[in-house]
Image (cartoon, rainbow, N blue to C red):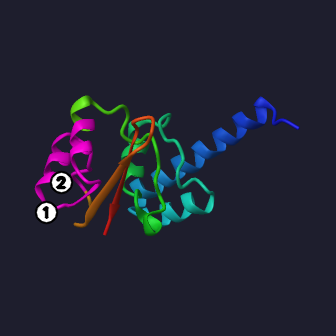
Amino acid sequence: MSTSPKKIATAKAFEQGVLMAASVLVSLHDQPGMAADIVNEFGLREADCSKLDDFDKQNLRKIQGLKHGSIKLRGLYGKLTPAQINLLKEREGACSDTYKPFIALLDVGLVDALRPKPGRVSWYLTTAGELVLAELN
């Protein structure tokens, strides 16, 4: 039995709505932990956010790595430039925010400059070359 295209479209729209609601929770109420709980409870820990607008992507970046590193949203950073890909490949996949590689990630726009607290940043590239960035404290 196959799922109808209408049901698939409805499910995708619902997922996008949950992600947008989590974004608003971060933006209006500064509650990234609660937003991460919502994303987690709906099973959207690795959801594709590429179709969301920049406002939502920026807010959802703040929940990356929460829930013990299980929030690994995709599509938050758009297509990487060759310079960004090379920089990420040079590194081991993690650095402290007081270390020079972090500053380099900040300079090429891969890390949010307005992070609320210091910590460690980790990342990996998917087989499609998409960045998954997680901030671990």
Residue 128 picture location, percent across and down: 45, 35
In front of the other: 106 or 55: 106
Question: Taking 65 as reference, is 41 left or right?
Answer: right
Q: Is residue 115 above or below residue 89?
A: below
> Which label was assigned to residue 98?
1
* Residue at figure coordinates x 76%, y 30% from the top left: 5
Question: Taking 2 as reference, is 85 left or right?
Answer: left
Q: Secondary structure at mark 1?
A: loop
Contact, CB < 8 Å: mark 1 with mark 2?
A: yes
Q: Is residue 121 above or below residue 87?
A: below
Q: Which span is picked out in magenta?
A: 85-114
How many numbered markers are drawn?
Answer: 2
Residue 58 visible? The answer is: yes
**Mark 2 belongs to which amino acid?**
Phe
- As drawn, the residue found furthest toward the left would be 100
Residue 14 picture location, percent across and down: 65, 44
Q: Secondary structure at mark 2?
A: helix
Residue 57 picture location, percent across and down: 41, 43
Residue 116 visible? The answer is: no
Can residue 133 be found in the magenta stretch? Answer: no
Residue 83 picture location, percent across and down: 21, 33
Q: CA distance from mark 1 to mark 2?
A: 7 Å
Instruction: Read off the residue under disc 2.
Output: 102
* Residue at figure coordinates x 18%, y 61% from the top left: 97
**Mark 1 belongs to which amino acid?**
Thr
Can residue 101 be found in the magenta stretch? Answer: yes
